């Protein structure tokens, strides 16, 4: 094992130990506790009072948290949820909480208030008295709050000796199975592909400074590129650029990414196993100094016939934004340049075959180019301000006319659904700062496809508020709002992933933040960390969820997943569309 992996493991040993029981439980499947009701903190999120926030073990400096999710009580407003008591009898309350000398809260079960206060000291498992409960619904209330305490789980059990260790294996939904757990360096993006040629999914971790660390499927470090220290601050504000793709068709993917040497910036194709440069051309940017607002790479199919095998480069260098295309040999094909402010063309570039003619168009911001770099349309007339840029795109036939439409989360201007080949607006709605978006048939009894957007809100950091929060806005196919969830925004910068989690080839599951969203548009906590990606990581025909958190990449699958014996990644269009051309935006 390399020094790098040993040092990462040592640094994160405490967190790893905290999740060790979770990993064991996922491998074997937890045995339900008899006559026991577990109430995780996430059960109170439906109507979270303004001020209360969710927190992880790392943020609370705790060895572990149930589901890696706690509620920090910064509002005196009560929290309320309802549980189902399995059988009548005497139940013992247990509360796991932490706080300080001036913080506290109490718990009420139905109309009975605990004599004990919680959330007053170091993290502890604390008994809270007994309750005679009938079978059926019972109300659980967090009340008498003195601000600042936190809790991660409450438990009602007929076991008078229930221990914290008994509850720890019960984390996460019963359907969730942890398949892989990788310690990784600091990252703001991870790219996936088979660099070793063994048919398994390997990955490249892109660090904020544009350094690269490549690992095989077992987590073994293969190689790394260390970016220079100059201009680190400028480079670290957005995702680092990179894609993993087999451009030379030798069944071992290369990594296309940014490098700096000999006083210049380069677009390189590196051997996926060794990091050796196979080909390179100057990165299409002006000489330093310049900004690194949005440097992005995507795989496209810009030539008729065959599989996708071209490279599209977005370079937002400050005052000038370019879109450049290259073939598999890094031979320049074309460049389109716009003299516009940062973010005017959004945060990613989308090669997508909108007219189904076998060749990709290139969508970037409110500009559509053909495969030769010629403009098809732009909507700079409607969106001239760079603050009103596109944050996320999806593609679907929303109005059922037989043609793909473009669905955009467009910052403060909201959600746009546009005709793909004219740019004409079909409908527009607002949803705070519209940041992340998905489209599909997710809700029952609602005309589909539905559009769901994460409406971002900004907090006052000087007042101690979380800077970023988000809440889901659901719309039907006509743009009518049908739901918001949860009732108030949750702190964080969450993303969506969607796919065939159960592997039946039919069902599309939608996940957001740490939650699986059901057909009513509400969430059940499924994962300890925010979702990052979803695809057929295992090569079974089912699709797995990848989560990303500081220091860890984890892969989860459904216990009910059906293995169809088909590796979806063998289809180059699936590999391009679902696996490789991926961004957090």
Image (tube, helix red, strand yellow):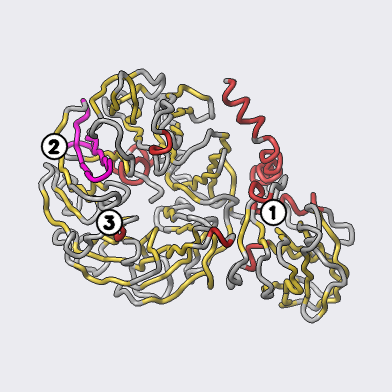
x then y, percent, for residue 444: 43, 72
On the image, the x and y values in percent for residue 306 come to 19, 36
Label 2 residue SS: strand
Disc 2 designates what residue?
334
Please give the name of the residue rendered at 31% of the width and 74% of the height, measured from the top-left corner.
Answer: 479
Q: Nearer the viewer, residue 18 or 198?
A: 18
**Which is in the foreground here, disc 1 or disc 2?**
2
Instruction: Tell me, yes or no, whether the two marked residues, 3 and 1, touch with CB atoms within 8 Å.
Output: no
Q: Which residue is mark 3?
A: 386
From this view, report whether residue 12 is shown above or below residue 172.
Answer: above
Q: Decide which of tag 3 and tag 1 comes sooner along the chain.
A: 1
Residue 148, percent from left and from top? 71, 62
Q: Quadrant of residue 74?
A: bottom right
Query: Gap in Å between the C-alphas at discs 1 and 2?
Result: 52 Å
Badge 3 vs badge 2, beta-carbon distance below 8 Å: no
- Disc nearer the start of the sequence (3/2): 2
**Observer-nearest of 250 and 59:** 59
Give the residue displayed 31% in from the left and 29% down from the top.
246
The secondary element bearing badge 1 is classed as: helix
Label 2 crowding class (10 Å Cα cut-off): few <14, some 14-19, many 20+? some
Tell me the number on the disc at residue 348: none
The residue pinned by badge 1 equals 66
In the rendered image, the vertical position of residue 161 relative to residue 179, given as above or below: below
* Residue 166 in the image: above or below residue 134: above
Q: Position of residue 190 (x, y in %)?
A: 44, 38
Separation (CA) of disc 3 from disc 2: 24 Å
Q: Residue at x 24, y 39 (%)?
A: 312
The reply to whether the magenta stretch includes residue 246 is no
Q: Which residues are magenta?
A: 304-329
Tally the numbered discs: 3
């Amino acid at each position: 094992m390399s020094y790098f992996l040993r040092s990462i493991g040592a640094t994160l040993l405490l967190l790893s130990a905290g999740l060790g029981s979770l990993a064991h439980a996922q491998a074997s499947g937890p045995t339900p506790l008899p006559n026991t009701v577990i109430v995780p903190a996430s059960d109170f999120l439906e109507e979270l009072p303004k001020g209360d926030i969710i927190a992880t073990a790392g943020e609370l400096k705790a060895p572990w948290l149930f589901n890696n999710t706690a509620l920090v009580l910064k509002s005196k407003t009560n929290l309320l949820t309802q549980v189902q008591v399995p059988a009548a009898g005497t139940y013992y309350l247990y509360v796991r909480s932490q706080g300080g000398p001036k913080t506290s809260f109490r718990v009420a079960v139905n109309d009975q208030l605990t004599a004990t206060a919680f959330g007053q000291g170091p993290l502890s498992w604390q008994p809270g008295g007994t309750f005679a409960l009938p079978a059926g619904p019972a109300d659980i209330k967090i009340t008498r709050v003195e601000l600042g305490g936190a809790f991660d789980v409450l438990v009602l059990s007929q076991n008078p000796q229930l221990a914290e260790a008994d509850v720890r294996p019960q984390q996460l939904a019963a359907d969730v199975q942890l398949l892989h757990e990788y310690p990784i360096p600091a990252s703001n993006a991870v790219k996936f592909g088979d660099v070793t040629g063994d048919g398994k999914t390997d990955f490249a971790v892109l660090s904020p400074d544009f350094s690269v660390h490549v690992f095989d499927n077992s987590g073994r470090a293969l190689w790394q590129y260390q970016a220079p220290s100059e201009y680190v601050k400028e480079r670290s504000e957005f995702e680092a650029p990179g894609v993993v793709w087999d451009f030379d068709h030798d069944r071992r993917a290369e990594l296309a990414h940014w490098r700096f040497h000999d006083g210049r910036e380069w677009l390189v194709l590196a051997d996926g196993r060794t990091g050796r440069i196979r080909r390179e051309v100057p990165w299409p940017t002006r000489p330093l100094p310049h900004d690194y607002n949005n440097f992005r790479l995507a795989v496209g199919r810009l030539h008729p016939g065959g599989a996708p095998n071209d490279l599209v480069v977005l370079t937002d260098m400050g005052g000038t934004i370019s879109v450049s295309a290259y073939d598999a040999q890094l031979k320049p094909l074309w460049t389109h340049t716009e003299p516009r402010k940062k973010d005017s063309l959004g945060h990613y570039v989308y090669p997508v075959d909108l007219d189904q003619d076998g060749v990709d168009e290139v969508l970037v911001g409110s500009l559509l180019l053909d495969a030769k770099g010629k403009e098809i349309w732009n909507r700079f007339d409607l969106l001239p301000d760079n603050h009103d840029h596109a944050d996320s795109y999806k593609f679907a036939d929303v109005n059922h006319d037989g043609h793909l439409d473009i669905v955009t989360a467009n910052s403060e201007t909201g959600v746009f659904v546009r005709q793909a080949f004219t740019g004409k607006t079909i409908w527009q709605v607002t949803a705070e700062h519209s940041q992340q978006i998905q489209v599909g048939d997710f809700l029952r009894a609602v005309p589909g496809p539905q559009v769901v957007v994460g409406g971002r809100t900004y907090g006052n950091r000087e007042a101690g508020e979380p800077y970023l929060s988000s809440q889901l806005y659901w719309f039907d196919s006509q743009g009518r709002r049908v739901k918001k969830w949860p009732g108030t925004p949750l702190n964080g910068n969450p993303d969506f992933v969607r796919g065939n989690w159960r592997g039946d080839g039919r069902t599309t599951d939608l996940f957001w933040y740490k939650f699986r969203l059901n057909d009513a548009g509400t969430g059940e906590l499924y994962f300890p960390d925010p979702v990052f990606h979803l695809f057929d990581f295992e090569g079974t025909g089912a699709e797995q969820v990848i989560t990303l958190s500081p220091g860890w990449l984890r892969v989860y699958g459904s216990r009910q997943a059906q293995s169809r014996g088909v590796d979806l990644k063998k289809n180059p269009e699936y590999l391009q569309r679902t696996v490789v051309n991926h961004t957090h935006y």
